[in-house]
Image (cartoon, helix red, strand yellow):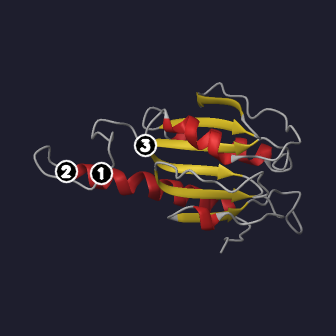
Amino acid sequence: MAAVTDNWRELFFAAVSEGIHVYEERSMWTSPWKKTDLPPNYSIDDFPKIGIIYDASGCMDDVKDEIVKVLKEFQVSYCGQAEFWVVEVDETVRNGPYELLPDWKGFGKGTGKKANLDPAIDALGVIGWFNVLIIATDGNLASEPCLSPEAGAVILLYPQNHKSIAEYFLDTVEIIIRNYDQNDGG
């Protein structure tokens, strides 16, 4: 079930931070000579990685500025302590994967084509394993996702009118974005 709150940012920050810190705690207790439950390709020396799949179909245009603002805040908070990788997707990968850097301006304009998440999951797979994967979509996809992302936790960001896609992923947190224009009374 999706969380509905006026302060969706607080819930989002908590979910991403939790995803990052779960694997930081695991890595602190690992020893090179012991078998661990860490995923393959994960090294204690790695920075936590956050993957972001943005539905570039146009369905997120009403909340795009809110998402950009929060991602920039997160990038500043974790600057030099985490990597943020972005893929913008509709039927195919439109842009990415690219690393979110301090001079990032935001997402491109919506294309009007329904999104297919598999090309984005595949593109991020080249980067490696992610502590957290954020998928910003309205859930009206061109096809059901077939690929499983290599991620510890999946956070689904939805606009007000959405279709849940949580059934396709494990360890999922669903958050409905509310911007000031959508809030009753501002």
Q: Name the spot of residue 94 as percent of width and height, x first.
A: 73, 31
Q: Name the spot of residue 172 as percent of width and height, x first.
A: 55, 64
Cβ–Cβ under 8 Å for marks 1 and 2: yes
Q: Name the spot of residue 52 as percent of width and height, x first.
A: 61, 43
Q: Quadrant of the C terminus?
A: bottom right
**Distance from Cα at disc 2 to Cα at disc 3:** 17 Å
Tag of residue 110: none
What amino acid is labelled 2 in the image? Thr
What amino acid is labelled 1 in the image? Leu
- Pick whichever, 49 or 10, lies toward us: 49
Question: Image check: 97 left or right of 37?
Answer: right
What amino acid is labelled 3 in the image? Trp
- Pick whichever, 104 or 171, lies toward us: 171
**Distance from Cα at disc 1 to Cα at disc 2:** 9 Å
Question: Image check: 48 left or right of 28?
Answer: right
Earlier residue among tags 1 and 2: 2
The residue under label 3 is 129
Dot 1 surroundings within 10 Å: few (below 14), some, or many (20 or more)? some
Earlier residue among tags 1 and 3: 1
Cβ–Cβ under 8 Å for marks 2 and 3: no
The residue under label 2 is 30
Where disc 2 sits, the SS reads loop
Quarter occupied by residue 157: bottom right
